[in-house]
Each structure stands twice: as C-alpha cells, then as structure tokens.
C-alpha cells in the first residue's frame, strides 16, 4: 500500500498500473464519503471510467480486499468493509461484563472537547504542519459506574472542525461511526502499541493518585491512507486481563 497515496509519485516511479488505479479508486471512495451499504461501481464501469482493462481493475479491487478496505458479497457486489474495532487491544485486555458475566462493549463518555494549539510531537504523528491546530478529546469508558479506560484523543481541526460545535454530552458512546456520520471521516484501519507506566496520574482512572497503568497508543488511518486520529488509552495495570488458548 502506498504510504502517502501520492499518485504523481506512483506514476513517476513507474509503479504498476493496477496500483495506480487502486490508489485512484480508494481516493474516489474517500472523496465521495462512500457508504458501507452501497456497492462500488462494477468492474466494467470502473474499466470504462479509468480507461483500463477489466483485468487491471480486478487486480486493483483484489488489492483493496486483501488490505481490508473492501469486502465482496456474493451476488450483491463489493462494499466498504466495516472495521472490527471491537477487537481492539484495550477491549480485549479490559473486557466489560454484564450481570450475567457476558462480555459487552463499555459505555464511552466524552468529558472534554476543545481546540488546542499544534503540538510538535502530536502533529508529527498526525503528519500535520507543526503549527496546525488540533482538537483534543478526553473520554472515559465505563463498566456500570466504574471507569475502566481513560482516553486522550487528538484530531486535525481542519478535518474535524464540526466537533467543536458540540458539547461533550452530545457525543455518542462510539466515536468512529460518529466521525464518519458527522465529519465524513472514515477510520479504516489502526495500529496499536502497548507499554506499562509505573507512576501515572489521571483524574478519571486513578483519581489523580500515582498508579501503575497500561498505555496503548493508537494511530488510526482514514480511507485515503492518512493518519486521522492519534489516541492514548490507559487502564489500571492491576485490572489487566490476558487469556490465550494454545493448541
């Protein structure tokens, strides 16, 4: 996959035609805010649109299927694939359970939403100019009345400016579907890295007392391949849960 989806670079470096088409198709879907329940154009329609063979289109589409961007449904067509973020590390390591002991999705509650000045470290992660303004969110994820996770989230203000029109109470529990519905920004994949911190203070998770925590840093990519969200999620080390079945 192209790291920055630069079509001019693809052409200049003489990348195969199907890779260039794969980029153009992915960029088209991002620009059009393509819906999950709407099939993409047929292979013949795409071949006519881009002036290439059906074989080239097929290779481009198969590449996006392999990368998890698209999914094929027999007899219906090819669609954008819903990312399975319920499988994220923090949910696996800090599972919320109902009264019957069944795993459930924790409730997300946004506590803070505000515009902040660009931060060199964060802006670099988000691949933004050093002085580009950011949107900063603080969110907790609850199991009943208990905070099990504390999130710090940074977004490009240019991409997500509409979020500043809302109060924290107006945010839904799940953010990624809301990013798409409200701002037209679709998260298609994410990368996570985990480490442990021995003395961390958090107003929601630790009541500002120093405690050992697990930190997971996530960068989330949009449909056009750029990083659109950076977040740090924290959970108490004492509540960390890991289970694996080895056969």
Image (tube, rainbow, N blue to C red):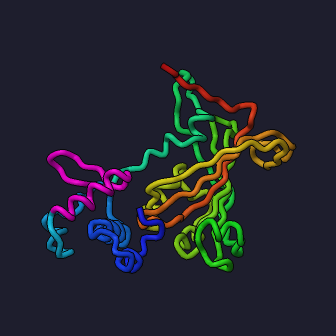
Across and down, in percent, residue 136 comes to 66, 64
Side of 229 where 33 appears, left or right: left
Side of 210 where 6 appears, left or right: left
Across and down, in percent, residue 125 comes to 62, 65
Q: Foreground: 182 or 134?
A: 134
> What is the residue that sits farthest to the top in this orientation?
247
Using the rendered image of the protein, determine whether residue 140 is visible from the camera's viewpoint.
Answer: no
State whether residue 145 is above or below residue 46.
Answer: above
Q: Residue at x 39, y 75 (%)?
A: 13
Across and down, in percent, residue 19 comes to 32, 66
Side of 137 where 205 appears, left or right: right
Q: Residue at x 70, y 46 (%)?
A: 215
Q: Residue at x 42, y 49 (%)?
A: 83
- Please give the range of residues in magenta: 55-80
Within the image, what quadrant is residue 50 found in? bottom left
Across and down, in percent, residue 74 comes to 18, 45
Q: Residue at x 52, y 72 (%)?
A: 159
Using the rendered image of the protein, determine whether residue 136 is visible from the camera's viewpoint.
Answer: yes
How many dots with numbers? 0
Q: Foreground: 162 or 189?
A: 189
State whether residue 5 is above or below residue 179.
Answer: below
State whether residue 82 is above or below residue 113.
Answer: above
Residue 39 within the segment the image draws in magenta: no
> What is the residue that sits farthest to the front in this orientation?
14
Within the image, what quadrant is residue 1 found in? bottom left
Side of 148 where 96 appears, left or right: left
């Amino acid at each position: 996959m192209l790291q920055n989806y630069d079509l001019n670079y693809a052409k200049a470096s003489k990348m195969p035609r199907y890779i260039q088409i794969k980029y153009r198709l992915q960029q088209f879907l991002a620009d059009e805010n393509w819906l999950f329940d709407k099939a993409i154009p047929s292979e013949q329609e795409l071949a006519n649109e881009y002036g290439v063979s059906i074989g080239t289109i097929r290779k481009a589409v198969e590449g996006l299927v392999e990368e998890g961007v698209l999914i094929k449904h027999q007899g219906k067509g090819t669609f954008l694939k819903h990312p399975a973020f319920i499988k994220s590390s923090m949910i696996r390591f800090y599972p919320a359970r109902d009264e019957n002991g069944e795993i459930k999705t924790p409730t997300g509650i946004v506590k803070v939403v505000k515009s902040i000045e660009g931060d060199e470290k964060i802006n670099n992660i988000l691949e933004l100019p050093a002085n580009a303004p950011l949107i900063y969110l603080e969110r907790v994820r609850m199991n009943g009345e208990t905070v099990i996770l504390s999130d710090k989230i940074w977004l490009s203000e240019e991409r997500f400016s509409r979020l500043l029109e809302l109060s924290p109470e107006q945010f839904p529990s799940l953010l990624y579907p809301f990013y798409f519905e409200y701002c037209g920004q679709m998260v298609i994949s994410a990368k996570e890295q985990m480490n442990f911190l021995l003395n961390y203070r958090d107003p929601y998770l630790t009541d500002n007392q120093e405690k050992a925590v697990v930190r997971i840093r996530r960068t989330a990519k949009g449909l056009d391949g750029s990083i659109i969200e950076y977040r740090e999620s924290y959970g108490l080390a004492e509540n960390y849960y890991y289970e694996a079945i080895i056969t």
